[in-house]
Amino acid sequence: MVNTILLGMDLAMWLVEQAPVIVVMGAVIYWLQAKLNKAEEDKDTLARDVIKLTMLWEEKSGELEENSTKIKERILELLQDIKTLMTRN
């Protein structure tokens, strides 16, 4: 009986000694989670902006000079690829 009480006290003391480590780990996890959320928000904002740009470019591409059809086709192809990549995610 006395041994279990001593063992329980030793365990309690060990847990108290570990409290600073737990607090630091919790703070680090909280900080990393905040950074991850910000990165995801930034990625989503970028994806929306690229999609808007792509749609606007497709609408306005007819206004380019006629002699630049090859450039226009290449730009449209690249923008459509970006749009496809962004809408998949």
Image (spheres, rainbow, N blue to C red):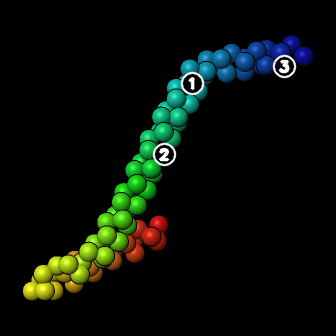
Q: CA distance from mark 3 to mark 1?
A: 28 Å
- In this view of the protein, which residue sits in the foreground, 81 or 72? 72
| Residue beneath disc 2 | 37
Q: Nearer the viewer, mark 3 or mark 2?
A: 2
Up the image or down, 82 lies above or below 16; here it is: below
Three-letter code, disc 3: Thr
| Element type at mark 2 | helix
Residue lying at the far front of the rendered structure: 63
Up the image or down, 43 lies above or below 29; here it is: below
Three-letter code, disc 1: Val
Rendered location of residue 27, percent (x, y): 52, 29
Rendered location of residue 37, percent (x, y): 48, 45
Q: Earlier in the sequence, mark 2 or mark 1?
A: 1
Rendered location of residue 71, percent (x, y): 15, 81
| Residue beneath disc 1 | 23
| Residue 79: quarter of image | bottom left
| Residue 62: quarter of image | bottom left
* Residue depicted at x 52% and y 36%: 29
Rendered location of residue 70, percent (x, y): 15, 86
Three-letter code, disc 2: Asn
Left or right: where does residue 6 sit relative to residue 18?
right
| Element type at mark 1 | helix
* Residue depicted at x 31% and y 66%: 53
Q: Quadrant of the N terminus?
A: top right
